[in-house]
Amino acid sequence: MTKTVADPVSGEPLSTGRAVRATVPRSSLGEFHAAPDRDPIAILERQAATRLPDLVPIRYARMAAGQFSFLRGAPAIMAADLATIPHTGLTVQLCGDAHLSNFGIFASPERSLVFDLNDFDETLSGPFEWDVKRLVASVAVAAREKGFTDEEATAAARSAATAYRECMRRLAGMDSLDVWYEQVDEETVANMVSRPKFLEGVDRTFEAARKRTNLGALRKLTYTDDQGALRIRHRPPLLTPVDYVDAQTVEEVFTAYRRSLPEERRVLADRYRIVDYAHKVVGVGSVGTRCYVILAVDRDTGGPLFLQMKEAEKSVLEPYLAPSRFQHQDHRVVHGQRLLQTSSDIFLGWVSGPNDRNYYFRQLRDMKGGADITQMSKAALRDYAGICGHTLARAHARSGDRIAIADYLGGERPSTRR
């Protein structure tokens, strides 16, 4: 519940959110002064120490592809930068890496398509504005990489911030249960585009997601061997076979993972058996962590199920915020995902494996899709940034004090007034 404090001048009660403005003015949210000992390379090297050595060059190559790619791969660098700036103390469950490419489409358990955050490796409790800054920074960088002017980049970034503020303000007036059920579906997205011609792009994106099913993955990722068994098609260095030790790990971890599922979903998981697995290189910032694709089939029909088993490391935010309350990093990731998303994968679960490594599971393909930022016009990027800002506010409102955040942000343009 939002508390009040006395205004030091008038003596009138102020909400917690408005009181925070005295110590962290909204105008200060856009300020940044690099620390004199700032060393981004050292941060990346520390991360590389825990990654698979053969994959680290792939990570750096992906980051070097452009400004936006570098930003995607460097949440640890931005976390260190954010930690040098006073924060509001208005905490939420952070995504931890809320850049533009970590939003997308996927199927809910009811098989309807929703738009939401989709990466939670860095999730942790922290000040709401850290996620907002990550989002608006990614919008500005994406705009500049496309050759937009500084004014156009600023307009796109402001679209994300404004949508966040307006959505949070609306949610602040709703009951908690209604906030919990709030979701961003295809209709919501369509209603947020500014031009009728953009609706065609929305329809195409959602339709493409509907086609990204386990059966589609079966045709693309597998073949039948000489004995008639399904096998994953290797594509070195991005999809490679596992050795005996890794195979034993996958089998052992998959068996234990069941225990993190609700009882009724264990029944479903038990209807599948593993037939093959492979190493997979994923993302940009995650490259070098241990990640596997698991191919399982229905024991009755032979229908395919592709799961991703991914290593969870400490959040890049943890050196600067309170440590996770969870003993295991996989549990932290799954908890954050379930708290931030309206609908989560029915196979989402976690397990601690050999050598104190933590893994979480989710489906590899379940009608997943996303927008192609590289093909967006100025107006389309502004719209998409707004949709992401709206979605981030919805996610934050589930765990944080939405009334205090809304009161802090107020009704004026963000970061422009005290």
Image: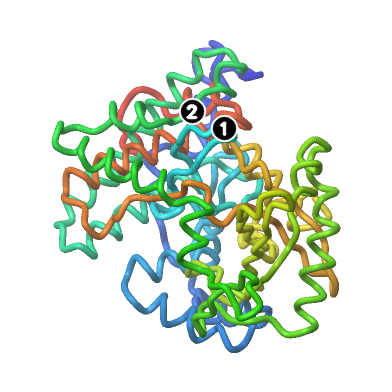
Near-viewer residue (264 or 129): 264
Look at the numbered discs 2 and 1 and tell me whether their residues touch, using CB distance below 8 Å. Answer: yes
**With respect to residue 90, does 254 lie above or below?**
below
Picture colour scheme: rainbow
The disc label shown at residue 307, or none: none
| Residue 275 image offset from top left, x and y in percent | 70, 67
On the question of residue 21 being in view, the answer is: no
Quarter of the image with the N terminus is: top right
Using a 10 Å C-alpha cutoff, classify the residue at mark 1 as few (fewer than 14 neighbours), some (14 to 19) or many (20 or more): many
Residue at image mark 1: 342
Quarter of the image with the C terminus is: top left
Tell me the element at label 1: loop
The disc label shown at residue 183, or none: 2
| Residue 278 image offset from top left, x and y in percent | 63, 74
Q: Quadrant of residue 358?
A: bottom right
Residue placed at 85% from the left, 57% from the top?
A: 256
Near-viewer residue (339 or 307): 307
On the question of residue 263 being in view, the answer is: yes
Residue placed at 65% from the left, 60% from the top?
A: 315
The amino acid marked with disc number 1 is: Thr
* Relative to 72, 193 lies left or right: left
* Relative to 324, 42 lies left or right: left
**With respect to residue 139, does 224 lie above or below?**
below
| Residue 56 image offset from top left, x and y in percent | 55, 83
Label 2 to label 1, Cα distance in Å?
A: 6 Å
Mark 2 or mark 1: name the one nearer the start of the chain. Answer: 2
* Relative to 41, 330 lies left or right: right
The amino acid marked with disc number 2 is: Gln
